[in-house]
Image: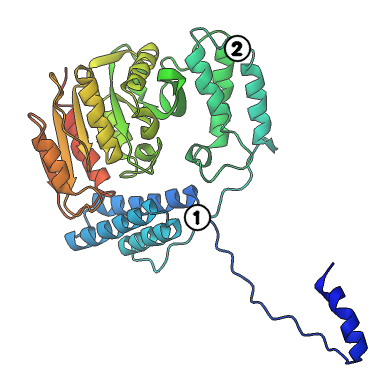
Amino acid sequence: MTASVLFMPALARAQVPVTPKAAPTVAPTAVTPKVTRADLAAAYMRVDAAYTQREIAKTLPDSLRAAVNRTVDRAALSFFSGQFAAAVSTIDAAAAQLTGAASIPPVPPAGPRSLNGAPASAARDEYLARLAAVDSTGPLAQALLSTRERAKLLVDVPSPERSAEFLNDPAKLSRDLAREVSVLERGRDPFIGLVGDFWRVYRGANNTLVPMRLVAPSSANVRKPVGVLLVLHGAGGDENMFVDAYGSGIITKLAAEQRLILVSPKTDVFGTSPEHFDALMTLLRNEFRIDSSRVYLIGHSMGAGAAARLAQARPAQFAAVAMLAGGSPITAPNAPPSLFVGAELDGIIPAARVEAAAKATPGATYELFRYEGHLLMVGNGVRRAVPWLVTHSR
């Protein structure tokens, strides 16, 4: 029973006319759009591209370099504390410092995707149905797994929280999948000797699925063996960071120039066990002629720590290793040569910590980047690390 019904008899006896009270005016509440991973990725790629352009053009004075690095690192601290909207706003402020723009226009969210007039999911379902008939337990197991997971990226509306979905080109992916599925149906591995840039998944230790981005240069399909450059991203990033950002993806160009297959796994999965590395190398040796004397490793921040642990656990497997804005001592016998790079303005992993790790590593080289901070130092770190790495071999 409601309160209005309870009070009606008393009002009737009193015969007092009652004027209903007007409902209070409530101002509409502004709905703040949720800041997604896609928003963060777009903002970071904007500032990374602007910084890289100024770097290449040599129009980045030290004062501006320092100011922008401090701003971007403040954004990183906002991100790590869960303040995503503040992180995007601060990153865009850094981009405006670089470009001189009054404001940075937002990137509209990705809309529904279609292929040949049909929903993208229709192509996905067709590919998955065909793959279901392929033997998943024999020598094609890894290839089948990768193709199946790639097919799942064909969604009608990409998730703004999953970069593998919102970064891929569905038309190109569908063309690639048509070939991969056809080759698998003929009982062959579609990835053997395959060159190009691909998001993939492989099965690591204990049936763990490890997402990765693999970029094989055109020289990888010739008879001469090729080397491997394994790169591990920092916290909050993913397997696409080194290829699409971190100096506008400069590492892909440098790796190709040195005839290296670039592999960027998801660090927070890959870094949990050195056996994931063992499974990866087995996969690569099945698909390419690998020069085992030229296997290199780079890590940034959390990835630098993972790189150091991997070099400690598998010291004989690497020709050299580089840690950018992070890392820990590598003291294993037969450890590879190591390069540690700290950033002068880094407030997340101070340069003093990186230098201490280098001093505790026998024979390590330490370098300091002045006027740079934790995130934007990676582009220059890559430009320094790759030429240094390839001077070494096992």
The residue at the point 62 percent across, 43 percent down is 157
- Do we see residue 388 in this rendering? yes
Q: Is residue 219 depicted above or below 321 in this figure?
A: above
| Residue 202 vs residue 80, the one in the foreground | 80
**Residue 134 numbered tag:** 2
- Would residue 190 be seen by someone viewing this image from the given angle? no
Tell me the kind of residue under disc 2.
Val
Q: Position of residue 289 (x, y in %)?
A: 32, 12
Say which residue appears at 20% left-offset and 33% top-offset. 322
Asked which secondary structure carries label 1, the reply is loop
Q: Nearer the viewer, mark 1 or mark 2?
A: 1
- Position of the C terminus, as image quadrant, is top left
Residues marked 1 and 2 touching at CB (< 8 Å): no
- Residue at 50% x, 11% y is 140
105 sits to left or right of 300:
right
What residue type is disc 1 on?
Val
Residue 266, how many percent across, how many down? 39, 33
SS class, disc 2? loop
Q: Quadrant of residue 245?
A: top left
Where the N terminus falls, by quadrant? bottom right
Instruction: Give neighbour class at mark 2: few <14, some 14-19, many 20+ (Cα, 10 Å).
Output: some
Q: Which residue is mark 1?
A: 35
User: Would residue 328 be found to the left or right of residue 174 on screen?
Assistant: left
- Tell me which corner region of the image, top left, top right, bottom left or bottom right, holds residue 358: top left
Give coordinates of residue 160: x percent, y percent. 53, 46
Q: Residue placed at 34% from the left, 14% from the top?
A: 222
Of the residues under marks 1 and 2, which one precedes in the sequence? Answer: 1
